[in-house]
Image (cartoon, rainbow, N blue to C red):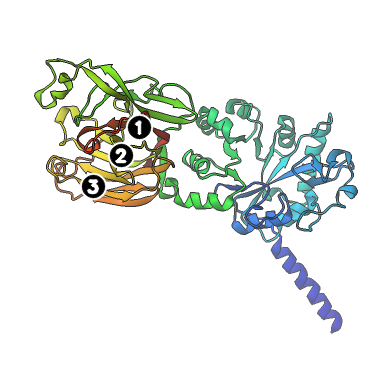
Amino acid sequence: MRYLLIVCLVIGFNACKTASVSNKIIFANNPVIAHRGAWKANNFPENSVASLKQAIALKCTGSEFDVRMTADNVLIINHDPEYHGLVIEETTYAELSKYKLPNGDMLPTLKQYILAGMQNNTTTGLVCEIKPSKIEGRNVMIAESVIKQVKELKAQPFILAYISFSHEILKKVKELDANAKTQYLDGSKTPEVLKNDGISGLDYALFKLKRNPQWIESAKNHGLLLNAWTANTTEDIDWLLANDFNYITTDEPELVFKRVSESPTAKGYKLVWNDEFDYTGKPDASIWGYDYGFIANQEKQYYADSLKNARVENGYLIIEAHKEKIANKDFKNPNIKDWARYKREIDTAQYTSARIKTEGLAAWQYGRIEVRAKLPKGRGMWPAIWMLSEDRKDIGWPESGEIDIMEHVGYDNDTIHGTIHTKAYNHLKGTQKGKTIFIDKPNDTFNVFALEWTPDKMDFLLNDVVYNRIINEHKTTDEWPFDKKFYLILNVAVGGMWGGQKGIDDTIFPQQMQVDYVRVYQLKK
C-alpha cells in the first residue's frame, strides 16, 4: 500500500510538471517585445529569469534576451561582452558564475533560461539575440550551438525569432532550421536585400527607420516582419503603432500596452497619409502647397513661401511669423472685390507668415486627422489647424463647409477652440458650432489636436479628450456639408478680426508654431 502511494505521488508530480511545460504556445496578439525581459518597473536585473517571468506575466508577445559563449563553450545570457570585469569569451562559466546577478540569482545559461521560458507560458515568445564574436570562425559555432540546444529542449515553438547584428549568424540559423524566423539588427541593409537573403524581417534602431521611412512600406511589400528598438517614449511608440509595426522592442512594456489601448489603430483606424518631418528644408512639395499674400479675415500677415516662414528642421515643421515689411503684389489690383478691398489698399505688409495646405494634393472624406504641435505665444497671434472642402471655389463659403480642428488666439492663451462653419451655422450669423477647452502651457509643450469624423458625427479632441461633439442632424447640406472630401491647412495668422481684437504686441516676434507630425487615419474597410 505504501509503495502504491509513492508511485501515485511520483505520477502526480510528473503530471503537474508536464502540465506546466508545454510544446504548444500561441503568441499573444500585441506588438510588445520586452527588451531583455520586463525588468525596469520592478527593478529586476536585465536578462534575468525574473525579468523573463515578468514579461510572461504581462503577456508580452515576446521577451528578448542576449546569448554569448564562454571560453569553455557554455552559452550564457548576458548583454555586454564583459561580466564583472571579465571578458566572457576568455573566461570559463565556472569563473563567471561565481558572481551572482543583483537580485541574487545565478548567471543563467541558455538551457536554464529556455526552460524557465517554457514554464507556465502560453503567450510569450523568446526573442533570441545571438551576439557576434570577435574570434574568427566562432559565429558559426555559436549559431550551431544555439540551434542544437533549442532542438534538444524541443523549444522551437517557443522561439518567436532569432535576431543578430551578424548577417552570417542569421544565414547559418536559417540553414540549420528552415522554419526559424530571423531578423537583422544592424540597419545597414535594405528590405530588398534581406528578402533576397531569406531573412524574415528587420529589427532596426528607431533613428535608422526614421531616416529611411521608405523602408517601412518596402518591408511590408516584401512580406518582411517589422520591428524596431528601443522605443521608450510615447512619441516613438505612437509612431511605430501608426506605421503598423509587427513588433516594438521596449524597456517600457507597460507604457506600450497603454499606448496600444489608446492608439487610433485600436479603434480600427489605419494610417493613410502622414508627414513626420524627418527631413530638412522646405515642406515636401509633393504633399504641401502654399497660399500667398493677404487671404482673409483682415489679417495683417502676408503669406509667403520663404524658408524664414516655412521650413523643416530638427524633425519639426516650423511656421514662423515675422515683423517685417514686404510689398503687396495685389496693391491696387482691380480684380480684388469690394468685400475684400483691404487686400488692394495696402501697399506694404508689416508682417510675414506662412499658410501651407494639401489642396490639390491630398483630401479625405471622414477619418481621424491628428496633429502634434506647440503653439506660438503673444497678443495678436492666431494659429490654426483646419480644413476646407475641395468644392469651396465652386459653391462658395460657408455653403461648402469648414472644419476648424484647432484655433488659438494669443490674448486668450490657455484656451483652444474646435468649430464647424456651414450655411446654417457660421460666425457671420453667430450660429457657428464650437466649443473650447483649457490647455496648459500650449507654447512650451506639445499637444495632440485631433478630429474624428464619421458620417454621423465629429469629435474634436485635445490629447485624446473629446471636448466638442457635433452630431449630424441628417437634414440638409446647409447643416452638414461634410459628406465629401476636405483638404488640410496649417497656418499662423497675425491680427485679424479675431486674433487682433486686442491688438498686436510687436515685441514678441518672431513667433512660430512647431509641428511634430501630421497623421491622417481612416477606418479599415
Q: Is mark 1 on a helix, strand or loop?
A: loop
Displayed quadrant of residue 391: top left
Q: Which amino acid does label 3 sit on?
A: Gly
Nearer to us in this view, 122 or 318: 318
Q: Which mark is residue 434?
A: 3
Q: Residue 32: x percent and y percent?
A: 57, 48
In this view, which residue lies farthest toward the bottom?
1
Q: Residues within 10 Å of mark 3 (few under 14, many from 20)?
A: some
In the image: residue 321, left or right of residue 516: left
Q: Is mark 3 on a helix, strand or loop?
A: strand
Nearer to us in this view, 432 or 264: 432
Nearer to us in this view, 2 or 364: 364
Residue position for label 2: 410
Q: What residue type is labelled 2?
A: Gly
Q: What residue type is labelled 1?
A: Ile
Sequence order check: which comes first, mark 2 or mark 1?
2
Placement of 175 over or under 72, stated as above or below: above
